[in-house]
Image (cartoon, rainbow, N blue to C red):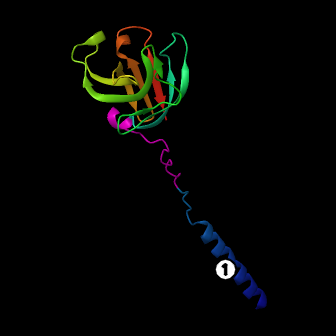
Amino acid sequence: MKTTLNQLAVLFALLTVTQACRIRITPLPPPNDPPSTQTTCQAPPIEQNIIGTWRFESNRSPPGTTRTGTVTFTAQNHIIDPDSLFENRIELGKIVDKIYSTDETNSSGFGGYTGKVFRVDLMLSTTRAGVIWPCYVASNECNKIVIYQLGSYNHSPKYGFTLTR
C-alpha cells in the first residue's frame, strides 16, 4: 500500500509538472525607442535671439584671416566687445560705444538686398558721429547666427561673422 501511495504521489507530481509546462509563455514586446534627446528648436526672431553672449568667428578683415572671441549683445542694443569683433579705433578717433539695430529695412536694394538690416553703429569719442556698418542676417538658428556685410550680398567671398552659443 505504501508503494501504491508513493507511485500515486510520483504520478501526481509528473502530471502537475506536465501541466505547468503546457502554460504558454509569451515574450514581452521590445521596449519602445527611448525619446530622442535631440530637441528641435524654433529660433526666435533675430531681435530676441541675438541677445546674450556668443562666441564669434569673423572673416571681416584683413582679407584671408579669421578672428575668434566672444561678444555680448544686450537687450538695450549695446554691444560688449572685449575681443574686438568690431573695431575699437578708426582713423577719426577712439570708439566709445557700440550699438546695434535690427529694425530697419533696406528698401533701396543696396547691393541687391531688400530685406531687414542688422546695423552696427560704432560711435566716436570726439563726436556723437561714427561709422555705420550695415549687415544682413543670412541664417538665424537657435544656437548659430550668420551675419554678412550688406555690400557682400551678391559677391563672393562674403564678409561677416558667425555667432555660436
Q: Residue at x 49, y 14 (%)?
A: 61
Is residue 45 visible in this depiction of the protein? no
Out of 13 and 112, give the one closest to the viewer.
112
Q: Residue at x 48, y 30 (%)?
A: 81
Location of residue 96 by image quarter? top left
Is residue 156 visible in this depiction of the protein? yes
Let me know if residue 136 is in the magenta part. Answer: no
Left or right relative to 133: residue 1: right
Q: Quadrant of the N terminus?
A: bottom right
Out of 13 and 139, give the one closest to the viewer.
139
Give the total of numbered labels: 1
Residue lying farthest left? 107
Q: Residue at x 51, y 54 (%)?
A: 29
Residue tagged 1: 12
Q: Position of residue 4 (x, y in %)?
A: 74, 86
Residue type at tag 1: Phe
Left or right relative to 136: residue 23: right
Magenta segment, principal secondary structure?
loop
Q: Position of residue 155 (x, y in %)?
A: 38, 8
Location of residue 151 by image quarter? top left
- Can you say whether 44 is above or below 128 in the image? below
Let me know if residue 41 is in the magenta part. Answer: yes
- Can you say whether 79 is above or below 15 in the image? above
Q: Which residues are magenta?
A: 29-49
For the residue labelled by badge 1, is the local secondary structure a helix, a strand or a loop? helix
